Amino acid sequence: MKKVVNKRIRKFVGKSKLRKAMIVVVVMIASFIYANIEIDKKLEKSDGIQLVDCVDGDTAKFMVDGKEEKVRFLAIDTPETKHPNKPEGYYGKEASEYTCTRLQEANEIVFEFEKDTYDKYDRMLAWVWIDGSLLQQELVSQGYAEVKYEKNSYNYIEKLKGLQAHAEEQKLGIWSK
């Protein structure tokens, strides 16, 4: 009797390990599929994105899947150039020209989104990738923009802060005053 019980226990435990292994494999596959779906949701490929107008250094208008969208670049602020109630900011014109040139000469523009896709002014909020380079990083590293409106959960915040510290140290662009 004892042998039969031990045999059944071993058989059950063996099946249990197999079940656990199968569950782990299924969870891993599901996680991989979910992660790929999330990445696809965050990135909007350039075949649906076309520049319509450069607004200033941190905002532009694009056609996105047939709809015109005003896009505010996440986590940065460039000096004002077209604000109705504020004078043109120091280095604002240079920041606007740099942004506009980069966007006009781009072969590929890709948007990456965080949790909030629109702000209170109904502007689309996005990380803007131009030919594989993050525009926000370029603007901050060259002193055209400062890190602002950041949320700790934003993907590239720490990198941007480091680039800003270097630009300030080197007295580049807006930090040269």
Image (tube, helix red, strand yellow):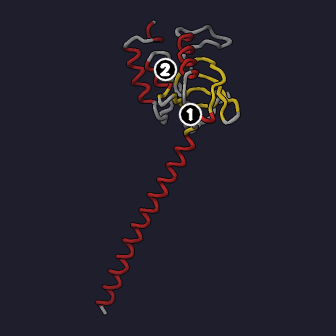
x, y percentage for residue 144? 49, 16
Q: Residue furthest right?
A: 67
The residues bearing labels 2 and 1 have C-alpha atoms spaced at a distance of 16 Å
Determine the residue positioned at 55% across, 11% down: 92
Task: Indicate left or right for 169 with 41 as reference.
Answer: left
Q: Amino acid at mark 2?
A: Leu
Residue 134 vs residue 118, the one in the foreground: 134
x, y percentage for residue 143? 46, 15
Residue 72 vs residue 161, the one in the foreground: 72
Q: Earlier along the polypeptide chain: callout 2 or callout 1?
A: 1
Task: Indicate left or right for 90 with 51 as reference.
Answer: left
Determine the residue positioned at 56% across, 36% down: 113
Determine the residue positioned at 63% across, 35% down: 48
Residue annotated with mark 1: 111
Determine the residue positioned at 56% across, 33% down: 111
x, y percentage for residue 8? 35, 84
Secondary structure state at the residue bearing disc 2? helix
Tell me: residue 14, above or below residue 41.
below
Residue annotated with mark 2: 139
Secondary structure state at the residue bearing disc 1? strand
Image quadrant where residue 60 sits: top right
